[in-house]
Amino acid sequence: QKEVEQNSGPLSVPEGAIASLNCTYSDRGSQSFFWYRQYSGKSPELIMSIYSNGDKEDGRFTAQLNKASQYVSLLIRDSQPSDSATYLCAVRSGGYNKLIFGAGTRLAVHP
Amino acid sequence: DGGITQSPKYLFRKEGQNVTLSCEQNLNHDAMYWYRQDPGQGLRLIYYSQIVNDFQKGDIAEGYSVSREKKESFPLTVTSAQKNPTAFYLCASSTQNTGELFFGEGSRLTVL
């Protein structure tokens, strides 16, 4: 059974700090990795995708991938209260576009 | 405006009734998916379709049925055989290239 694991949180950080969200996956053959943000009662929104080892930056967001350790993370710099949401890690493995989702980490940014 | 439209947003069903959730996309995506989300849990795949007239079962297909007669449409029927249907249902689509999924706004089904 392929799995994606995340700490459920809540992860509480002060406004302006760096929030670090982590995700591990079990299938060593996984190829593509995604971070989604989900506000309470809303649908998930894609915020980052990463396909190769290393870092990928987009504005205040940085995704980090380490395939050897089967680990992907999301850093949010200068965290804002509007970043308070659940962050879902998703992993694609196999030859088709089927994503496996983690249960999500709830982030709370307090003023 | 390109996007994915799900309807209805809220639906109440009596036990023993079938209900159909609509999903339409105008993104010209080949693949479409149905996920279910329960409170505090991740998304679980119900069915997916890579091309018209073809679909595959996901991890929790029992009690559900789908069709894919048009590229734009992928309706989900929740049958009376689904023992615990109260959940948030999410439709998504993707291109074959990137695998990035884009979601509709979701349909919240409550069984009375």
Image (tube, coloured by chain):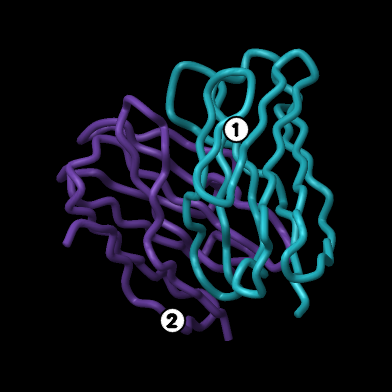
Chain colours: A cyan, B purple
Callout 1 environment at 10 Å: few (<14), some (14 to 19), or many (20+)?
many
A31 vs B100, left or right, is: right
Name the residue nearer the viewer: B53 or B100.
B100
Name the residue nearer the viewer: A46 or B77.
A46
Q: Chain of mark 1?
A: A
Quadrant containing the N terminus of chain A is top right
Q: Nearer the viewer, mark 1 or mark 2?
A: 1
For residue A67, above or below residue A38? above
Instruction: Indicate the position of residue B83 as horizontal and vertical percent values.
Output: 63, 63
A25 vs A56, left or right, is: right
Residue at x 62% of width, y 28% of height: A55
Instruction: Indicate the position of residue B52 as horizontal and vertical percent values.
Output: 20, 35
Instruction: Indicate the position of residue B16 as horizontal and vertical percent values.
Output: 51, 74
Q: Which mark is residue A91?
A: 1
Q: Chain of mark 2?
A: B
Name the residue nearer the viewer: B40 or A62.
A62
For residue A96, above or below residue B107? above
Instruction: Indicate the position of residue A15 as horizontal and vertical percent values.
Output: 74, 70
Name the residue nearer the viewer: B69 or A20.
A20
Residue at x 67% of width, y 26% of height: A65
Amino acid marked by disc 1? Val
For residue B64, above or below residue A5? below
Amino acid marked by disc 2? Tyr
Q: Which residue is under mark 2? A: B10
Quadrant containing the C terminus of chain A is bottom right
Instruction: Name the element at disc 2.
Output: strand
